[in-house]
């Protein structure tokens, strides 16, 4: 049994303007806020072609996306186990469109991915920005973006 919040961040040949430590910390902020005590989360930064392939294979959607999250079935009292894939190049495009920094957008994608792994969901389209999950996400992004004391 995992007795902690274990978060591993790796990169498949892509660079991001934020440290792996900062991304892992963002995931832990979500897990603690959601009262998760045991977790094993893998966050992998991938290229746009790689996330497009994952998107097609597993979700039957075409083209690259920003984040894909796979939460695995948990036994009662068992740890949260999830794999999260993030495409920094897509995050850069999102950041420009939303007029936010790339680091903030990458943190947002980690938060979004972890929330999905925990079972949260949102509607598709523009109404997603008004959903309870989105509001929770934005509150957690704000918390994760605060400077360390």
Image (cartoon, helix red, strand yellow):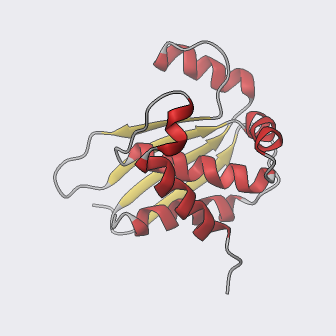
Q: How far across and how far down the image is residue 14, in percent?
A: 79, 39
Q: Nearer the viewer, residue 125 or 143?
A: 125
Residue 93, relative to residue 62: is it above or below? below
Residue 142 vs residue 82, the one in the foreground: 142
- Residue 99 sits above or below residue 59 on the image: below
- Residue at the image point whose x is 78% and y is 44% from the top: 95
| Extreme-bottom residue of the structure | 149
Q: Position of residue 121 (x, y in %)?
A: 40, 39
Residue 105 place in picture, x, y as percent? 71, 49
Q: Quadrant of the C terminus?
A: bottom right
What residue appears at the point 69 percent right and 50 percent down from the top-left corner? 106
Q: Quadrant of residue 31?
A: bottom left
Measuring from the top left, give residue 25's x and y in whole percent: 59, 66
Q: Residue at x 62, y 66 (%)?
A: 142
Can you tell which quarter of the image residue 143 is in? Answer: bottom right
Q: Nearer the viewer, residue 130 or 92?
A: 130
> Height in image: 50 above or below 33?
above
Count the marks: how many? 0
Looking at the image, the residue that sits furthest to the left is 76
Looking at the image, residue 67 sits to the left or right of residue 4; the answer is: right
Q: Quadrant of the N terminus?
A: bottom left
Q: At 64% from the left edge and 26% from the top edge, which residue is drawn?
A: 51
Q: Quadrant of residue 73?
A: top left
């Amino acid at each position: 049994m995992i007795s902690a919040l274990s978060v591993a961040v790796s990169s498949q040949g892509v660079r991001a303007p934020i440290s792996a430590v900062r991304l892992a910390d963002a995931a832990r902020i979500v897990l603690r806020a959601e009262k998760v005590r045991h977790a094993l989360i893998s966050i992998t930064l991938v290229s746009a072609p790689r996330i497009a392939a994952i998107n097609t294979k597993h979700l039957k959607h075409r083209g690259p996306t920003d984040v894909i999250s796979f939460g695995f079935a948990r036994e009662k009292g068992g740890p949260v186990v999830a794999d999260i894939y993030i495409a920094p190049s897509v995050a850069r495009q999102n950041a420009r469109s939303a007029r936010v920094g790339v680091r903030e957008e990458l943190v947002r994608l980690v938060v979004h991915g972890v929330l999905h792994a925990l079972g949260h969901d949102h509607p598709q389209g523009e109404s997603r920005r008004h959903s309870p999950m989105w509001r929770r996400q934005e509150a957690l992004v704000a918390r994760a973006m605060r400077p360390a004391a």
